[in-house]
Amino acid sequence: MNTVLIKNWNARIKPEDTVFVLGDFCFKTTSENKMVSGFTNISDYFQSQLHGHKVFIKGNHDNKTSTKTLIKSLHIEYGGLIINCVHDPADFDPGCDINFVGHIHQNWLIRKSKKSILFNVGVDVHNYMPITIEEALGKIARIKKNEAIEEYVNNQNPQP
């Protein structure tokens, strides 16, 4: 699986790109992880295999690996939106327009709070590939548009 993830990452990410990794970058031990000769830790090995400049947000498994970061969450302003990047959806920021989250694997893609949207950017729900911010916002817009259409139709044809 590590080989597939590396291949998918490098197919999408150019060396000059910046990538936000929302926690749990790697696990400490797997059978494939034994092939890291010349590296002092598994995180450095995987980072050396992947294109781009990586910004790590702390995940719940990162304290067990050699992936080090002090960043628990990070706000990005993009296209007039304030986007919070955080690992665990439980730590979302309701004051942001959108929260990009990880942690939940394939449990869900999108959730709404009163004022914010939570969007799962984990590779588990994106064909095991990283996605761009434009792709994430495009998916959110399509989902919101479909919900608006469904709401409009339901209001035009109320159920008894």
Image (spheres, rainbow, N blue to C red):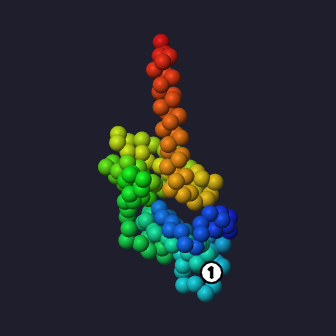
Q: At which x and y percent is residue 124?
A: 59, 54
Residue 42 appears in the figure: no
Q: At which x and y percent is residue 130?
A: 57, 60
In the rendered image, which residue does mark 1 sit on?
36
- Count the numbered circles shown: 1
> Residue at 47% of width from left, 31% of height from top?
148
> Residue at 50% of width from left, 36% of height from top?
145
Q: At which x and y percent is residue 159?
A: 49, 16
Q: Is residue 39 above or below residue 89?
A: below
Q: Is residue 79 left or right of residue 19?
A: left
**Amino acid at circle 1:** Val
> Residue at 56% of width from left, 75% of height from top?
47
* Depth order, front residue of 9/23: 9
* Depth order, front residue of 108/152: 152
What crowding class fits label 1: few (fewer than 14 Cα within 10 Å), some (14-19), or many (20 or more)?
A: some
Q: At which x and y percent is residue 6?
A: 64, 68
